[in-house]
Image: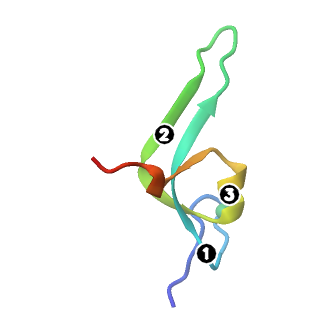
Amino acid sequence: MSTTICESCGSEEPRLYRVHRRYITTAAWDTPGVDRTLDEVESWCFACCTSYPNVFADEIAEP
Ligand SMILES: [Zn+2]
Protein backbone atom coordinates (compact mmCIF):
# COMPACT_ATOMS: atom_id res chain seq x y z
CA MET A 1 0.00 0.00 0.00
CA SER A 2 1.29 3.40 -0.84
CA THR A 3 1.45 6.04 1.84
CA THR A 4 -0.81 8.99 1.31
CA ILE A 5 0.44 12.16 2.90
CA CYS A 6 -1.37 15.44 2.52
CA GLU A 7 0.87 17.95 0.73
CA SER A 8 -0.70 20.81 2.62
CA CYS A 9 -0.59 19.74 6.28
CA GLY A 10 1.63 16.64 6.05
CA SER A 11 -0.80 14.36 7.81
CA GLU A 12 -1.21 10.71 6.76
CA GLU A 13 -4.67 10.19 5.39
CA PRO A 14 -6.59 7.24 3.93
CA ARG A 15 -8.00 9.42 1.17
CA LEU A 16 -6.53 12.42 -0.62
CA TYR A 17 -8.07 14.74 -3.16
CA ARG A 18 -6.35 16.21 -6.20
CA VAL A 19 -6.66 19.95 -6.08
CA HIS A 20 -5.17 23.12 -7.48
CA ARG A 21 -4.09 25.46 -4.71
CA ARG A 22 -5.81 28.82 -4.92
CA TYR A 23 -4.60 32.11 -3.53
CA ILE A 24 -7.27 34.57 -2.59
CA THR A 25 -6.52 37.94 -1.05
CA THR A 26 -9.25 40.38 -0.29
CA ALA A 27 -8.72 43.78 -1.82
CA ALA A 28 -7.78 46.57 0.56
CA TRP A 29 -7.66 50.30 0.07
CA ASP A 30 -4.00 50.15 -1.01
CA THR A 31 -3.76 46.71 -2.64
CA PRO A 32 -5.82 45.04 -5.34
CA GLY A 33 -7.37 41.68 -4.54
CA VAL A 34 -5.72 38.51 -5.79
CA ASP A 35 -7.50 35.39 -7.04
CA ARG A 36 -4.98 33.01 -8.55
CA THR A 37 -5.18 29.26 -9.14
CA LEU A 38 -1.94 27.32 -9.52
CA ASP A 39 -1.46 24.96 -12.47
CA GLU A 40 0.21 22.19 -10.49
CA VAL A 41 -1.92 19.53 -8.85
CA GLU A 42 -1.44 18.75 -5.17
CA SER A 43 -2.85 15.98 -2.99
CA TRP A 44 -4.80 17.28 -0.04
CA CYS A 45 -6.74 15.65 2.75
CA PHE A 46 -10.42 16.42 3.24
CA ALA A 47 -9.75 18.80 6.14
CA CYS A 48 -7.42 20.95 4.04
CA CYS A 49 -9.88 20.91 1.15
CA THR A 50 -12.50 22.43 3.41
CA SER A 51 -10.13 24.80 5.23
CA TYR A 52 -8.15 26.37 2.41
CA PRO A 53 -9.12 27.84 -0.96
CA ASN A 54 -8.67 25.33 -3.77
CA VAL A 55 -10.13 24.10 -7.02
CA PHE A 56 -10.73 20.38 -7.48
CA ALA A 57 -8.47 19.19 -10.27
CA ASP A 58 -11.20 17.17 -11.88
CA GLU A 59 -13.33 20.24 -12.33
CA ILE A 60 -10.73 21.87 -14.58
CA ALA A 61 -11.60 21.17 -18.19
CA GLU A 62 -8.77 19.73 -20.24
CA PRO A 63 -8.10 21.65 -23.44
ZN1 LIG B 1 -4.16 18.18 4.97
Residues packed near mark 3 inside 10 Å, few (<14), some (14 to 19) or many (20 plus): some
The secondary structure type at the circle numbered 1 is loop
**Where ligand 1 lies, by image quadrant?**
bottom right
Q: Quadrant of residue 3?
A: bottom right
Q: Give the left or right position of residue 57, taking residue 61 as reference.
A: right
The yes-or-no answer for disc 3 within 8 Å of ligand 1 is yes
In this figure, which residue is indicated by the disc labeled 1? 15
**Image point (63%, 44%), residue name:** 53
Residues packed near mark 2 inside 10 Å, few (<14), some (14 to 19) or many (20 plus): some
Above or below for 36 versus 5 = above
The secondary structure type at the circle numbered 3 is helix
Question: Please, which residue is most extreme toward the left here?
Answer: 63
Q: Quadrant of residue 27?
A: top right
| Callout 3 amino acid | Cys
Which label's residue is closer to the chain start, 2 or 1? 1
Above or below for 26 versus 20 = above
In this figure, which residue is indicated by the disc labeled 3? 48
Which label's residue is closer to the chain start, 3 or 2? 2
| Callout 2 amino acid | Thr
